[in-house]
Image (tube, grey):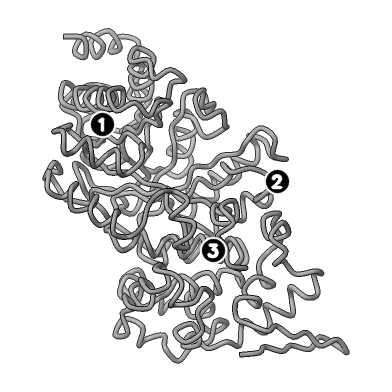
């Protein structure tokens, strides 16, 4: 289908829905690198005007990546819930935006239509939205998941405690865990990005985290963020794996570059479920995504990176995850050049993930060669908290010494909690009070007297 839009005397033609979506996207370096971005601001506005008139039904007929070539497309099409789609089936992309912003789109209604929204629909409507629109609609989307605690309740924000170490040193990791716990972080999970891929080292880290959680009787879950096939091997060896992790992308070819496909993810999901380690629920998967991954793998099919990011959420949605995390600025300035592009992308990712029914968190981060700084991250963190973000990262000093990028610190999470009055997962808040780390007002207390006690319990 060809799309046309006139602005004054100038007429713009977009040969495919794929091209229209790309040209309508807010500026970002990855789309310029891929050669799919609008050439001028006027062309971008023309594409948005044309996109606003596209019926949502068009996205069920016109695939941005061919059905016969891509298993992610087949997952989206074959898994589409037509009954859930019916309340919005008569809308165009533009009227869908208006409806999302209206009082008719309540949290309950949005939860009901989520299975009927395809990733391309979510991406399309996001391209017509200002930042405030993305924040307002995402705030209305409540997605609740459970393993050993309850994540995603309204008025709460969780934190993944990220105690990475460049040599996977047990003492260094344990010290970072204690630091994070003393500052009230860790209810999303305690998750280590290992430096090693040695199965013996990884098994040791899995057992370390299990020991910490068990000895402290802590209502949270652990994850060693290794490849899904390694997690499968660890499960088969009897290791105490809580969450099964994998990075995912929005095309079959990009996922192949990660060494995965949908069949492997299904096998891993079933293996995680078989352990029955959750006490409140069995959401056992943890996925990470990020705009630009398909482009970096030369697996983008000419589709803009934000639409492909939304398609990655279709992969995640198929496996009922506890956590999904957009590592928004991690890949680098080739894909998101500066703070403005990172902020916009973070809000888009959060909006699309929540709209599709996912427990979306954001690693508010940047690499040191990007045109961004910690003030940009403060801005994005604050905007995401206003939008009801499910969880963020807690990194010692906001500086990950293993991955060598800048993220958010334990103190940043305390700032957001104070600013918005956000609590943690209720079971984790109860634990903090029980061990004396917080008072009845849930504020973190002076930790100096408690550190030796917790350390002694771990060493015992």
Q: Which mark is residue 134?
A: 3
Residue 101 in sight from this viewpoint: no
Whether label 1 touches label 3, CB < 8 Å:
no
The structure residue drawn at horizontal position 78% and vertical position 75%, both measured from the top left corner, is 43
Question: Dot 1: few (<14), some (14–19), or many (≥20) neighbours within 10 Å?
Answer: few
**Position of 419 relative to 120 (above/below):** above
Q: Quadrant of the C terminus?
A: top left
Q: Look at discs 2 and 1 and give the one toward the viewer.
A: 2
Mark 2–mark 1 Cα distance, whole angstroms, equals 41 Å
Q: Quarter-wise, where is residue 410 in the image?
A: top left
> Is 139 left, or right, of 8 in this rendering?
left
Instruction: Pick whichever of labels 2 and 1 is earlier in the sequence.
Output: 2
**Of labels 1 and 3, the one closer to you:** 3
Nearer-the-camera pick, 269 or 432: 269
Q: How many other residues sit within 10 Å of disc 3, few (<14), some (14-19) or many (≥20)?
A: many
Say which residue label 1 marks.
440
| Residue at 35% from the left image edge and 33% from the top image edge | 191
Describe the element under mark 3 as helix, strand or loop.
helix
Image-based side of 429 in relation to 412, left or right: left
On the image, the x and y values in percent for residue 232 come to 23, 42
Asked whether 135 or 262 is in front, the reply is 262
* Mark closest to the chain's N terminus, 3 or 2: 3
Measured Cα–Cα span from mark 1 to mark 3: 34 Å
The front one of 373 and 416 is: 373
Q: Which residue is mark 2?
A: 338
């Amino acid at each position: 289908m060809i799309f046309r839009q006139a602005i004054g005397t100038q007429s713009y033609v977009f040969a495919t829905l794929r091209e229209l979506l790309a040209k309508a996207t807010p500026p970002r370096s990855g789309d310029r690198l891929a050669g799919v971005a609008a050439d001028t601001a006027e062309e971008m506005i023309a594409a948005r005007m044309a996109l606003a008139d596209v019926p949502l039904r068009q996205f069920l007929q016109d695939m941005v990546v061919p059905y016969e070539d891509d298993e992610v497309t087949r997952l989206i099409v074959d898994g589409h819930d037509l009954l859930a789609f019916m309340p919005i089936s008569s809308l165009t992309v533009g009227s869908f935006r208006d409806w999302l912003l209206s009082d008719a789109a309540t949290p309950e209604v949005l939860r009901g239509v989520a299975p009927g929204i395809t990733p391309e629909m979510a991406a399309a409507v996001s391209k017509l939205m200002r930042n405030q629109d993305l924040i307002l609609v995402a705030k209305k989307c409540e997605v609740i998941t459970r393993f050993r605690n309850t994540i995603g309740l309204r008025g709460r924000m969780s934190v993944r405690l990220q105690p990475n170490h460049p040599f996977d040193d047990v003492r260094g990791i344990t010290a970072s865990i204690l630091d994070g716990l003393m500052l009230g972080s860790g209810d999303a999970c305690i998750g280590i990005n290992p430096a090693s891929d040695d199965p013996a080292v990884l098994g040791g880290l899995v057992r370390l985290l299990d020991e910490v959680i068990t000895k402290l009787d802590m209502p949270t879950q652990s994850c060693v963020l290794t490849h899904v096939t390694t997690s499968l091997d660890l499960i088969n060896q009897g290791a105490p794996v809580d969450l099964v992790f994998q990075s995912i992308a929005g095309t079959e070819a990009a996922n192949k570059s990660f060494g995965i496909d949908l069949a492997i993810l299904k096998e891993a999901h079933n293996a995680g479920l078989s352990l029955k380690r959750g006490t409140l629920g069995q959401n056992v998967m943890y996925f990470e995504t990020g705009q630009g991954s398909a482009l970096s793998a030369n697996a983008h099919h000419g589709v803009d990176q934000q639409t492909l990011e939304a398609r990655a959420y279709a992969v995640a949605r198929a496996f009922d995850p506890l956590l999904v995390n957009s590592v928004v600025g991690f890949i680098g300035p080739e894909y998101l050049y500066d703070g403005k592009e990172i902020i916009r992308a973070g809000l888009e990712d959060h909006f699309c993930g929540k709209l599709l029914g996912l427990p979306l968190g954001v690693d508010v981060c940047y690499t040191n060669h990007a045109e961004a700084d910690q003030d940009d991250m403060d801005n994005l963190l604050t905007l995401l908290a206003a939008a009801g973000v499910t969880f963020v990262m807690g990194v010692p000093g906001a500086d990950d010494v293993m991955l060598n990028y800048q993220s958010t610190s334990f103190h940043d999470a305390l700032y957001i909690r104070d600013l918005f009055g956000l609590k943690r997962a209720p079971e984790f808040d109860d634990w903090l009070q029980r061990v004396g780390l917080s008072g009845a007002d849930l504020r973190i207390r002076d930790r100096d007297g408690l550190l030796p006690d917790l350390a002694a319990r771990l060493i015992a």
